[in-house]
Amino acid sequence: MADPRIVLGLLICGVLAIAYASPQGRILGGEDAAQGEFPWSVSVRVNKAHACSGAIISQNQILTAASCISSVSTTPIDPSSVAVRVGSINQYAGGSIVSVKSIVIHPSYGNFIHNLATLNLDQNLVYSDRIAAVALPSIGEETEATEEELPNGTPVYVAGWGELSDGNASYKLQKANFNTLSAPWCELAAGYGYEHVICLSSAEKEGICRGDAGAAVVDDSNVLRGITSFHFGECGSTFPDITTRVSYYLDWIKANACLLGLTLLVAVQAGGRIMGGEETGLNATPFAASLRVDNAHVCGACILSETKVLTTAHCVHRDGKLLAANRLSLRVGSTNQYAGGRIVTVDSVNVHPEYYQLQNNLVMLTLSSSLVFTDRIKAIEVAGSDDPLPAAGSEVSVAGWGRTTDGTTSYKIRELALQVSPEADCQEAYSDPAGDSFCLSHELKEGTCHGDGGSGAVYQDKLIGLTNFVVGACGSRNLTQSIQAMSLLWSFLFFVGIASVLAKPNKTEPDWSPRIVGGTKATTGQFPHQISLRRRGGHTCGGSIISSTYILTAAHCVKSGNNVAPARQLSILAGSLQLSGGGGETRQVAAVHVHPKYRGDGYDVAVLRLTQPINLNANAKVIELSSEDPPTDASVYISGWGYISNSGPISNDLLYGQVKKMDRNTCRRRYLPRLADTTMCLLHDANKGACYGDSGGPATYEGRLVGVASFVIGGCGRDAPDGYERVSQLRQWIKDNAKL
């Protein structure tokens, strides 16, 4: 027998073609549903004929299968050709017909994977006993194991107008009972045991058929568990029917119900251009890059250095989960999103530690290979933390490949001038108490749209923001929300490892003299508490020996977003001055304990338990935890193997430097108004201080551990203090978790 996954495309393409040519019918082997029994069920109609089913999830939104309304991939058919019949079990009469205003297809949809779409209605529904929204799963269920949500054999129910076994049409809504198959059983039965689907079993010659796609799958409590997607072979075969698991996509569904994000995460299509914009010249926006997921454009991005690219965090998330770096790439050096320039792959993804929904919406991408700057590939300078926001009415330029007013795609990048909105207007449209955003105004039917997320907002040739989201539909109002780069990229506590690379983006001849930045080679036994924390064998951070079996490091070294690095990927090197070739002992990490209050701002510590003790000696010693901070202006030692300049490389030799403890009030006033209670500022001269790879490393005073490297401000070696977590404030938690 052929692998069903191989013939899937052929089988389903036939199903869809028939669905449009002969849309009537009912669930195979089903029975008539009673009026009001499935009040969320709607008939999705294309050119006035039933094509699929759908489920009401709010007064103005229908959830259905993307395959029902896709023209090509994530590009939908014309919304004006789509309507829904609600409030009737008769697909031909009764209830009411409601027009569809817009269609949002899941950005990763393709070949019936991620087969979801939302239809935004032209008017709100009036609920009744025949028209009601179906209950969505609770938020917590999206992280549960799939078998815990729906154990094998769970009864579920589907209602639709799919085709009958003899091919005849039925005007009545049909209902049928199914049982779920667990992922292992579905893999065994059909080779389709994916976590984002639910497989349904039924008797032979029963099940979903043409016209049933998009129907709701509900459990005994009438909670929406799935949306019917496709069947293998002929209707009613012995293969399971496949539905899209709703709990897996809760974040995406709920994001569509709130703000219209400027990524294709909540977009209609992958192509397009800035609304009302003009095509740019070949060299006009050399910093602009097309961010691609699975080789398709999803967002804009800005080149900051030869290896660093900045974009918005929601562009690299799907359904609340961070995408793997190997799914991401960028096209640089071309105004054409489909051709020219160069495709570069992404090595790592570092999300702002406080990213949530569209707040703190930033991510730094590290490229797998360095860019070669030309007239068409250049870094853009970022406005400084002390640069004021442009005055209201100032023109700001935004360029991107977002959607157009008519929904068609454009291969060329387009640029548009927008105006900075008065703060009062911005607050009225979108309240931002943190003050990390600003608004740009535009004419009707102009502005940023789907696919423009992450594109740069540029003023006087400096990057001042990244496009974030629109309020309402694209071009429908005169406000476009944009993240304010000055506050989030400079003032906010970015941690070492993704701390800003923005200070001198066009510098082509960095100073490679060996230093921590500005450091000196350590001597044998000088810092015996220092360790190298490694992930998959490669150095990532520093750390300190606090007992023979416990290491103290920074939380951000082992946690990104909600994801903690598995202990099996982590190891440490102790007792060596060199990262390689210097001897020492390697120990595997057995457990990772991140401070429970760590959210990216303060509490940036983690304790690692080792699988076996370190052999303590003159080169590998425990350091005492200090119970108090150093005095103001006291000299403090820092050490590590981090970058020796803002753009690298790391040092193979352990380096150290001297910094000064800064008064907390002075640090707050001059640099960090939001300085966390657990964080201290260590001041250094320009071209000195901590850098990438030094995170988690020690700061010592009079032989005791007083700080843990957390972040730099602006860039490595900048004339600004570095942030270190205060051991004195976190000492009790450290002792409790290290069993000291």
Image (cartoon, rainbow, N blue to C red):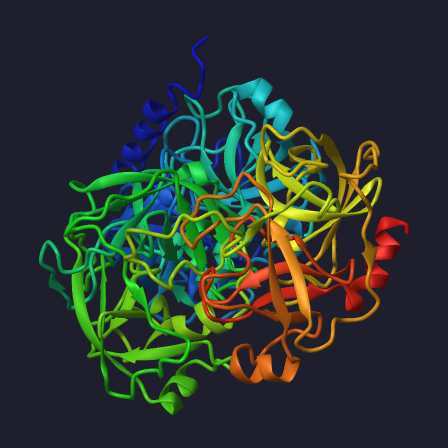
Place of residue 602 in the rendered image (x, y in percent of width and height, measured from the top left): 66, 67
Where does the image place residue 593, in percent across and percent down from the top left?
Answer: 76, 49
The answer to whether 603 appears left or right of 248 in the picture is right
Is residue 270 in sight in this rendering? yes
Towards the viewer: 417 or 215: 417
Q: Is residue 214 left or right of residue 225?
A: left
Pick the residue in front: 502 or 111: 502
**Depicted 68 relative to depicted 581: above or below:** below
Quadrant of residue 445 within the rendered picture? bottom left
Q: Residue furthest front?
A: 523
Rendered position, 148 above or below 726 = above
Residue 423: x, y in percent?
Answer: 38, 88
**Left/right of residue 270 with respect to residue 87 in the rendered view:** left
Q: Residue at x 78, y 58 (%)?
A: 703
Which residue appears at 59% of the width and 32% of the height? 536
| Number of marks drawn | 0
Residue lying at the far right of the rendered structure:
740
Residue toward you, 271 or 131: 271
Between 345 and 6, the residue placed more toward the observer is 345
* Residue positioned most to the top: 1
Q: Position of residue 114 (x, y in %)?
A: 44, 41
Left or right placement of residue 203 versus residue 645 in this view: right
Res 223 visible: no
